Image (tube, rainbow, N blue to C red):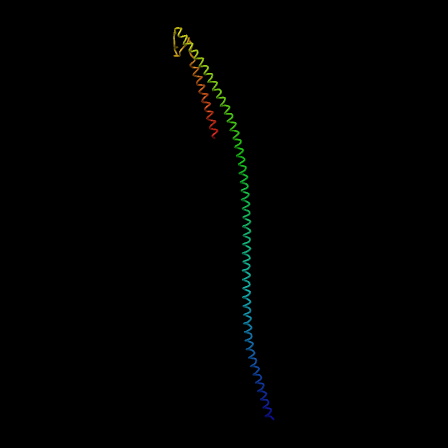
Amino acid sequence: MAEVNATIEARLVKVVQTTIQDKCDDGSLKRGMADDIEKSVISQVDDQVNSSMVKIVRRKVKEEMTKRDLAADIVGRVQVKMESRLDEMVGSNIKEKYAADDIVGCVQLKVESRLDEIIGVKIKEKYAADDILLRKILDDTKLVKNQVLRSSSSKKKRTVSCVESRATKPQKKPYRADGNPTCGGKPEAGGSLAEEVAEVTKASRKASLVRLTAHTNLRM
């Protein structure tokens, strides 16, 4: 009986030891599997994280590129609008300047036309006055010439009568002490004739000067 009990106890101890060993082996296996699972999970998580990070980075880069493109597009549109506005302003200023120049040109033309009219009137008035003066000078010259002709004709008659009287009467002194010829003891009017001729010449020169002045003013 004691041997049976000892055998049973030994058998139980062996079973217990075997069970414990099996449990230990199962635990080691489970721990190894757990480690593998953990590594696999970690690897998967890392892969997912990396993939997610790559996706996030790509998305961020894409968003930044989109933002830059939008910003560049906005800047381009703003520049186009500013250039268009500047073109409008420049065009408006140019039109205003041309309009002002046209107004100034019209005013200048009107002023020049008015000045031409005034100058034309003044020239006509001056020419009219010069014509009146010239006619007056010509009339005076004709009058003086007629007077000289009448005076010279009367002197010729007196000279002829003096010659006739000389032919009938003896002459005492044909010449005076100053060298002037005499007729009946009276001096001839040679000096007054020279003065009249000088006056006629002077009047003719004055008329020529007036004509020259009138032609010069007409050319100017």
Which percent across, then down, holds residue 121?
53, 29
How many numbered marks appear? 0
The answer to whether residue 47 is above or below residue 126 is: below
Which residue of the protein is positioned furthest toward the bottom in this rendering?
Answer: 1
| 155 left or right, relative to 47 | left
Which quarter of the image is occupied by the N terminus?
bottom right
The answer to whether residue 203 is above or below residue 78 is: above
The answer to which of 79 and 56 lies nearer the viewer is 79
Which percent across, then down, holds residue 76?
54, 54
The answer to which of 72 and 99 lies nearer the viewer is 99
Residue 190 occupies quadrant: top left
Which residue of the protein is positioned furthest toward the top in this rendering?
Answer: 169
The answer to whether residue 193 is above or below residue 64 is: above
Which percent across, then down, holds residue 60?
55, 62
Which percent across, then down, holds residue 64?
54, 60
The answer to whether residue 127 is above or below residue 169 is: below
The answer to which of 54 and 9 lies nearer the viewer is 54
| 106 left or right, relative to 212 | right
| 140 left or right, relative to 22 | left
